Image (cartoon, rainbow, N blue to C red):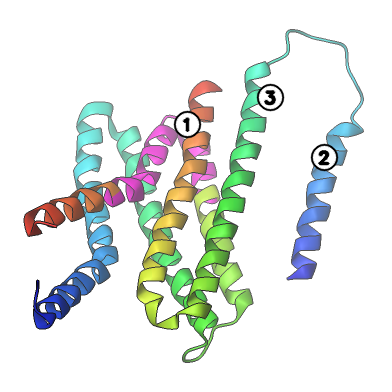
Amino acid sequence: MMPISATLNSELTSDSFYSHALSRISRSMLVLACMFVPLSLMSHGWRIALGVALGSAIAYINFHWLKRIVHRFAERATETGSSPSGRRIVLLALLRYVLMASAAYAILNVSPASLYGLFAGLFLPVAAIACEAAYEAYVALARGI
Amino acid sequence: MRKLSTLFMVLSLVCFAVPAFAQGGEATGPVNWVAIAAGFSMAIASAVCGLAQGRATAAAAEALGRNPAARAGIQFALILGLVLIESLALYTLAIIFLKVK
């Protein structure tokens, strides 16, 4: 049987480990973008690489804004601190879609070939979440859970 | 909020109404079923993803109301859920662009 102090200690370390997951995902997105843009430049040319870079930037901003929206939403739901207005939260949520649609429209007008790169870049958060899942599985196995 | 939802409903009705009143022309060729199917699939994907995001947010709000101390975990799960649900709609859009080009 595990002593109480050891159980509490392991719970605290796992809490701190999981609380840093979002920052790890953000960092993974940056690292993956820095990997994919030169790779697509070498393999598919500058048009696709431009699309990937733009898509990665939009995905990163989108993820960051989503975190802010959820944070404000949680503040409003728990009513801690100065709860932000619901209208502002809805406007910020709509602004994300406006940003994505305007970037897709602009890139479609300038260079339709870059649109495939843009889509590839927009899937960056999914790749980052997959990396985080793999990392968490590795840590769980290393800890012997 | 009710005014905003009414505005969106009216706009969607107007979008449906305009093609309905268009004058029918002579048949010029075979019907492009891929484009029609793509439109329907995007509409279905958007609707289901919207419903899923709404349900996830409602469940998170309920969980936050019941247990405000678990805010960090609920926030993290909600962000991951919303990102993955949004990516499903993006998958559909990407497949449509690949098929209808």
Q: Is B49 on the left or on the right of A110, as rendered?
A: right
Q: Amino acid at mark 1?
A: Pro
Q: Is A29 on the left or on the right of B8, as rendered?
A: left
Q: Which residue is mark 2?
A: B16
Chain to which mark 1 belongs = A
For residue A2, what is the image quadrant?
A: bottom left
Q: Which residue is mark 3?
A: B36
Q: Position of residue B22 (x, y in %)?
A: 89, 30
**Extreme top residue here?**
B29
Q: Residue at x 7, y 55 (%)?
A: A142
Q: Residue at x 47, y 33 (%)?
A: B94
Q: Position of residue A95 (x, y in %)?
A: 55, 62
Q: Are marks 1 and 3 on the same chain?
A: no
Q: Residue at x 60, y 81 (%)?
A: A85
The residue carrying pointer 1 sits among few (fewer than 14), some (14 to 19) or many (20 or more) residues within 10 Å by Cα, namely: some
Q: Are marks 2 and 3 in contact (CB under 8 Å)?
A: no
Disc 2/disc 3 C-alpha distance (Å)? 14 Å
The residue carrying pointer 2 sits among few (fewer than 14), some (14 to 19) or many (20 or more) residues within 10 Å by Cα, namely: few
Q: Amino acid at mark 2?
A: Phe
Q: In what element is the residue under mark 2?
A: helix
Which quadrant is the N terminus of chain B positioned in? bottom right
Q: Which residues are magenta?
A: A102-129
Q: Are marks 2 and 3 on the same chain?
A: yes
Q: Please determine whether, in this image, residue B92 is positioned above or below residue B77.
A: above
Residue B101 in view: no
Q: In what element is the residue under mark 1?
A: loop
Q: Please determine whether, in this image, residue A104 is positioned above or below residue A116.
A: below
Q: Earlier in the sequence, mark 2 or mark 3?
A: 2
- The chief SS type of the magenta part is helix
Q: Which residue is mark 1?
A: A112
Q: Is residue A136 magenta?
A: no
Q: Position of residue A59 (x, y in %)?
A: 39, 52
